Amino acid sequence: MNRPQVPPALLSAIERDLRPVRPLASPAHRALGMLPVGLLLLIGMPAFWIGLGRAKLAPSAGWAFSALESGLSLIVLAGAFREAVPGRELSSTRLWALAGLACIAFLLANATIQSPGPVPLQTWLHWFRGCIYMVISFSIPALLAPAWLVSRALPNRPALTGALCGAGVGLMADAGLRLTCWDGGFVHALLAHGAAIALLTVLGAASATAVERLKSSDR
Amino acid sequence: MTSELRCYYACVLAVDASRCELRKMNSSEPPGESDELRLMTLMVAYQNGDLSAFEQLYASLAQPLRRYFRNAERNAATADDLLQETFLELHRSRRTYAPPLPVRPWAFGVARNVLLRRRRASAMSGQTRELDDESDLQPVAQIGGVPLLNDVIDMEQALAELPATTREPWMLHHLFGFSFDFIATRLGITVMAAKLRSSRATKALRCALSGKLEEAR
């Protein structure tokens, strides 16, 4: 049987554009590249409130848990970067493991959180909205970095890839937010911070899908 | 030997022969390690800007990819278009291949991306996928000058009648030789679901082909 020959048009198109390329770094290396963003989110929010003179910082144990949460969020991002590469999609077992890890990271970090006392409902709702705004306003610029890294690959499941990116960045933002959260109650953390992470997950999924559509329409 | 019995043996032999040809055409043997190593070396050379490496990669990957598209789209012209698009996409995305990982899963991953994109574009433009007539299926049985066998066409038709959800796992396993673990990852389903769908496809194919055999008798 004859070996298939490259059609001349395809060959000339490839020849015109052929130049050496450097393979993408491994997902773990690319996730480590997100470390500065994680540090920025971890320190950025306390610094913001200190700058406004309204900081109520968490005890040192809280910082350790936040650092742990940031570290675990890098694993979620590494999963997203792996998912973005064709042929390296995550199996359902690994996806469940990642989702479990994200939940454990969030619950573990917030399990030690302590409320200063009962908070009136009106204030509780105000702080609920405030926390969501804080996470979103700090995370959306941060979400651009993994979105850019994902767009360089070719995800077969862009929504899932984006959702993992959103969850990773959301966890990073929560790690910083919980250090200066005024409420500090577990229920508040679970509902407000959890809702913010869920919102970022949805935003990540939507943005990655939109990026893929844009890339498709360019081709 | 009665004519009925002779006909039965002829059918059995023809089915065996067609299976044999299908196996040859689709290289059902899972790709060996040395072949993967060769592809990996070619891919690295291609990433370094070697055009002859691309030509050799094309020679190795074009047929399995074309078969994948033919069976997914059941249209020879569309399959050829998709093949061209896939090699262009492989070129654009060549940096996403990370040596020393196997090349085939990556190439099929890109092919799947191209196929999904095409289907999405078709769905958005309101086009419906046309089920081809027999003339589109015949050339598959004639690849490489293999004589046209009715059973090969029967097999193609039986495959074409399967729903895509069961056909794809069956083909990836039985024709391309991929493991169920790989297929599950590729299609985003569980290993058990991949096995179940493949088993359903086998059952349906057996029914369809035994029906033809009965007709032949």
Image: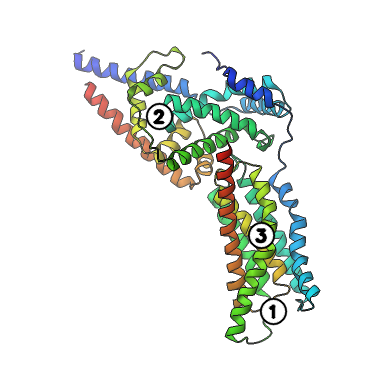
Residue located beneath label 3 in the image? A140
C-alpha separation, residue under disc 1 versus residue under disc 3: 22 Å
Name the colouring of the figure: rainbow
The one nearer the camera, B136 or B7, is B136
Q: Quadrant of the C terminus of chain A?
A: top right
Label at residue A182: 1
Task: Specify whether B197 is left or right of A125.
Answer: left
Q: Image height check: is B105 above or below B150?
A: below
Q: Do labels 3 and 2 share a chain?
A: no
The one nearer the camera, B140 or B123, is B123
Q: Quadrant of residue B10?
A: top left
Decide: few, some or many residues near mark 1? Use Cα within 10 Å; few <14, some 14-19, many ≥20. Answer: some
Q: Which chain carries label 2?
A: B
Residue A165 seen in render: yes
The one nearer the camera, B109 or A199, is A199
Q: Is mark 2 on a helix, strand or loop?
A: loop
Q: What element carries label 3?
A: helix
Decide: few, some or many residues near mark 2? Use Cα within 10 Å; few <14, some 14-19, many ≥20. Answer: many
Q: Do labels 1 and 3 share a chain?
A: yes
Residue type, label 2 = Arg
Label at residue B74: 2
Residue A136 image position (x, y, % from top left):
64, 65
Write the residue at 59% across / 39% down: A86
Residue B29 seen in render: no
Q: Quadrant of residue B74?
A: top left
